[in-house]
Image: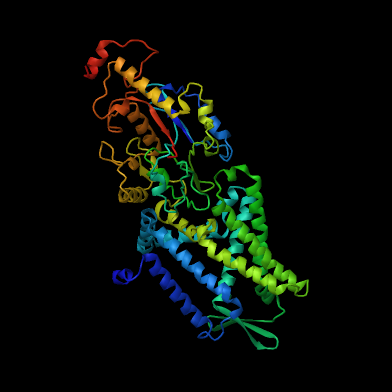
């Protein structure tokens, strides 16, 4: 897998297409695994899309008492294995980003797996393939770096100079899995 | 205890040693000081020992994981606490009936999957119980007189029965019944694995498929034995017997390493109602940010201990841990820090600033100089 997910929260228009697309995905039982939420509804109508970061060292997997959360060769963090998950919800509390969801009916956890069946073959995940405002993109690593650079330049034009250690805070979030 | 552990290569080898000693002890009692060992089952016996060693090794390393260790520690604490006895008993009975005997949650994932899993699970547990009971000599049958059979368990004579009675029939046909359950269940499982594309995305041959095929081979050859001696007058019985033995040995040795290993892990589900959630879906702990109920105090303490043990540092600016916030607040924290809006989340009386001043507002409109003055960043 060479491509990465690239998120620009400000571009989100709150149409929730990504959630609808997620629901359509096979094996999701018509339940979406990503989020679209308001940053602060009383302040503005700005929404943001949110999906799993696919951490290299996932806290969710480390707090799972049943060892149910597996990581694929490519680095995608999968939903809890249905046969092992005991339904304790430790993962939902351990995750620093609040990503895993829990199904009380079927007693299992489910989370964004970056549409592993698609991204494995460098096909864009469902959410990125439908996003009309390019808030979620699935792009080459080089393209991502280019976008980040341009973004930093825009910030400089704006008169905002990154200080010593927060350079990365001036560029949008990207994540992805690299098989190195 | 430490001294004993040091004399072994590892904790797993120590535990395996004690398990093997214990099994020998039960054999010694069951077979009347090794006088009634069924040597026809010797191959199965050796494989059963390997099965138990494999299980012990896997379970030892599993319990040593910080997350598992913490959960088991709290469960033991709660089991001992006098105040919680009522809740403990309720949790154990409820989990036993709902999750293990009836497996209700799997039926909710689909009737087909429910039936398939129930058949495999109870077929497996039943077959394993009978296999171990016979190979280790935990039980055997004694002829009391011409028309009475007696079951002897661990050297203690128990049930008496007529050899042609219903009870005797059920006991003698025990393995055939469980094998039939297994055969139906396994075929259903394999059909699902072939037909359902969703399962194929994450399934792994060595983990998901091999155990199923070994199970199929084992039940197939096992039932073939019955067919051979009941219908074919014992045709090829020794050869089928050997084939069945080989597949069973394979199954027992592979069991701890495939997906069937979830069998000994499942009972830990009792820890959920016992330690964390008395009623499913009802939370008691408040989020530091929005005040919404999202978990229980004990669970968050445990999660934080586990994270701490593994060097995860999720402290926020206001001195809390990220797990003190509800998932929705944590998602907001992530977005806000990415948008460079690092207000002390949740403690600020002011509304959250959603315009971070970095990106261009209103599609390229120039910003007044006063904006930067106000922020004190000239």
**Nearer-the-camera pick, A152 or B93:** A152
Q: Residue at coordinates 44% horizontally, 46% vertically from top-left? A: B282
Q: Quadrant of residue B102?
A: bottom right
Q: Is residue B248 left or right of residue B374?
A: right
Q: Residue B296's spot in the image, x, y percent?
A: 37, 48
Residue plotted at (36% across, 40% down): A96
Give me the residue at 61% from left, 68% from top.
B246
B36 lies above or below B279 = below
**Where does residue B225 sit, x and y in percent of width and height?**
70, 70
The single residue placed furthest to the right in the displayed view is B232
| Residue B146 coordinates in the image, percent (x, y) | 70, 88
Which residue occupies the foreground of this view, B60 or A23? Answer: B60
Colour setup of the view: rainbow
**Quadrant in the picture for residue B75:** bottom left
* B280 or A107, nearer to the observer: A107
B375 relative to B355 in the view: left or right? left
Q: Quadrant of the C terminus of chain A?
A: top left
* Residue A51 at x, y percent in the picture: 45, 34
Q: Does residue B378 sit above or below B302 in this rendering?
A: above
Measured along the vertical axis of the image, is residue A34 above or below residue A46? below
Q: Nearer the viewer, residue A22 or A165?
A: A165
Q: Is residue B243 visible?
A: yes
Count of numbered tags: 0
Q: Is residue B174 visible?
A: no
Question: Is B302 left, or right, of A52 in this rendering?
Answer: left
Looking at the image, the residue that sits furthest to the bottom is B145
> Residue extending furthest front?
A180
Is A89 situated above or below B359?
A: below
């Amino acid at each position: 897998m060479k491509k990465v997910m690239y998120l620009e929260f400000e571009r989100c228009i709150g149409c929730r297409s990504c959630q609808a697309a997620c629901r359509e995905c096979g094996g999701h039982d018509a339940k979406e695994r990503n989020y679209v939420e308001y940053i602060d509804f009383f302040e503005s109508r700005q929404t943001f899309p949110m999906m799993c970061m696919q951490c290299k060292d996932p806290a969710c997997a480390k707090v799972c008492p049943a060892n149910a959360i597996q990581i694929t060769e490519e680095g995608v963090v999968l939903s809890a294995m249905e046969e092992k998950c005991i339904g304790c919800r430790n993962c939902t509390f351990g995750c620093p980003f609040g990503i895993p969801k829990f199904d009380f009916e079927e007693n299992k956890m489910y989370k964004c797996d970056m549409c592993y069946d698609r991204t494995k073959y460098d096909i864009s995940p469902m959410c990125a393939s439908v996003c009309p405002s390019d808030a979620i993109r699935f792009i080459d690593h080089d393209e991502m770096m280019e976008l980040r650079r341009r973004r930093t330049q825009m910030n400089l034009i704006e008169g905002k100079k990154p200080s010593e250690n927060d350079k990365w805070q001036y560029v949008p979030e990207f994540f992805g899995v690299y098989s190195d | 205890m430490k001294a004993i552990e040091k004399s072994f290569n590892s904790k797993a080898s120590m535990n395996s040693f004690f398990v093997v000693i214990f099994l020998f002890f039960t054999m010694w009692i069951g077979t009347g000081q090794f006088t009634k060992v069924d040597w026809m089952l010797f191959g199965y016996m050796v494989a059963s020992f390997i099965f138990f060693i494999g299980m012990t090794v896997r379970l030892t390393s599993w319990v040593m994981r910080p997350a598992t260790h913490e959960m088991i520690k709290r469960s033991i604490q709660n089991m001992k606490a006098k105040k919680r006895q009522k809740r403990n008993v309720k949790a154990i009975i409820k989990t036993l009936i709902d999750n293990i005997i009836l497996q209700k949650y799997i039926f909710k994932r689909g009737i087909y999957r429910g039936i398939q899993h129930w058949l495999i699970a109870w077929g497996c547990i039943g077959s394993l119980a009978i296999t171990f009971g016979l190979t280790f000599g935990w039980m055997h049958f004694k002829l009391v007189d011409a028309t009475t059979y007696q079951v002897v368990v661990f050297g203690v004579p128990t049930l008496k029965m007529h050899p042609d009675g219903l009870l005797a029939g059920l006991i003698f046909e025990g393995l055939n019944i469980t094998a039939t359950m297994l055969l139906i269940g396994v075929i259903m499982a394999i059909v699902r694995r072939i037909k359902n594309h969703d399962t194929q995305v994450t399934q792994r041959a060595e983990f998901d498929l091999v155990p199923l095929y070994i199970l199929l081979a084992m039940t197939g050859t096992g039932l073939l034995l019955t067919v051979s001696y009941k219908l074919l007058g014992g045709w090829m019985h020794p050869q089928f017997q050997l084939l069945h033995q080989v597949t069973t040995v394979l199954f027992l040795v592979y069991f701890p390493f495939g997906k069937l290993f979830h069998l000994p892990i499942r009972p830990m589900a009792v820890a959920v109602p016992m330690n964390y959630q008395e009623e499913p879906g009802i939370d008691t702990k408040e989020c530091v940010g929005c005040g919404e109920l999202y978990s229980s105090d004990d669970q968050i303490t445990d999660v934080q201990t586990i994270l701490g043990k593994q060097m995860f540092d999720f402290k926020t600016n206001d001195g809390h841990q990220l797990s003190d916030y509800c998932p929705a607040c944590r998602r907001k924290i992530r977005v806000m820090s990415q948008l460079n809006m690092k207000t002390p989340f949740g403690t600020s009386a002011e509304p959250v600033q959603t315009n971070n001043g970095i990106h261009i507002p209103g599609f390229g409109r120039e910003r007044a100089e006063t904006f930067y003055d106000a922020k004190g960043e000239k």
